[in-house]
Amino acid sequence: MTGTLTDRHNALSAIAVSTPPRLPTPADRIVGRLLRIPAGACRYRGPGLLLLVRRVRLDISDWYGGQWVWLEGEELAATGQRLRWTQALVHVTACVPDRLVPTQRDGHGR
């Protein structure tokens, strides 16, 4: 019985680890942009999130079947005030161009 459970665990682990996030927008185009993340598209949070993305953590995002990605950045209030540095596990469908807002620095978020 132990061998069977171990085999199942190893098979599931191999699938989970080997799947990079399937981002609809390249990671380098997300960094430096504001991302409006709707409620339900961010794990471990109830309401939506406005995030100034500083880093896309592809290195630790392989565990989520290609459907979720870790983002790091500054959480902003609706007024644009910076609230705190945060990490967020975001569904890849929330990382789409129509939710990316350029920052005011140069109009492109870079």
Image (spheres, rainbow, N blue to C red):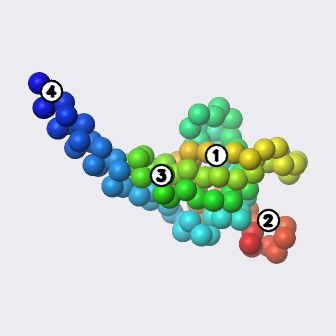
Furthest-top residue in this view: 1
Q: Earlier in the sequence, mark 3 or mark 2?
A: 3
**Quadrant (top left/top right/bottom left/bottom right) for the N terminus:** top left
Q: Secondary structure at mark 4?
A: helix
Q: Are marks 2 and 4 in contact (CB under 8 Å)?
A: no
Amino acid type, label 2: Thr
Tell me how far mark 1 sits from mark 3, CA to CA: 12 Å
Residue found 42% across the figure and 52% down from its top: 62
Tell me how far mark 2 sits from mark 4, CA to CA: 54 Å
Q: Secondary structure at mark 3?
A: loop
Amino acid type, label 4: Thr
Q: What is the crowding at mark 2: few (fewer than 14 residues within 10 Å), some, or many (at least 20)?
A: some
**Quadrant (top left/top right/bottom left/bottom right) for the C terminus:** bottom right
Tell me how far mark 2 sits from mark 1, CA to CA: 19 Å
Q: Nearer the viewer, residue 57 or 95?
A: 57
Tell me how far mark 3 sits from mark 2, CA to CA: 25 Å
Amino acid type, label 1: Gln
Q: Disc 2 marks which residue?
A: 103
Residue 87 is marked as 1
Q: Earlier in the sequence, mark 1 or mark 3?
A: 3
Q: Disc 3 marks which residue?
A: 61
- Between disc 4 and disc 1, the foreground one is 4
Residue found 45% across the figure and 56% down from its top: 21
34 to 87, vertically: above or below: below
Q: Earlier in the sequence, mark 2 or mark 4?
A: 4
- Residue 93 visible: no
Left or right: where 81 falls relative to 57: right
Residue 2 is marked as 4
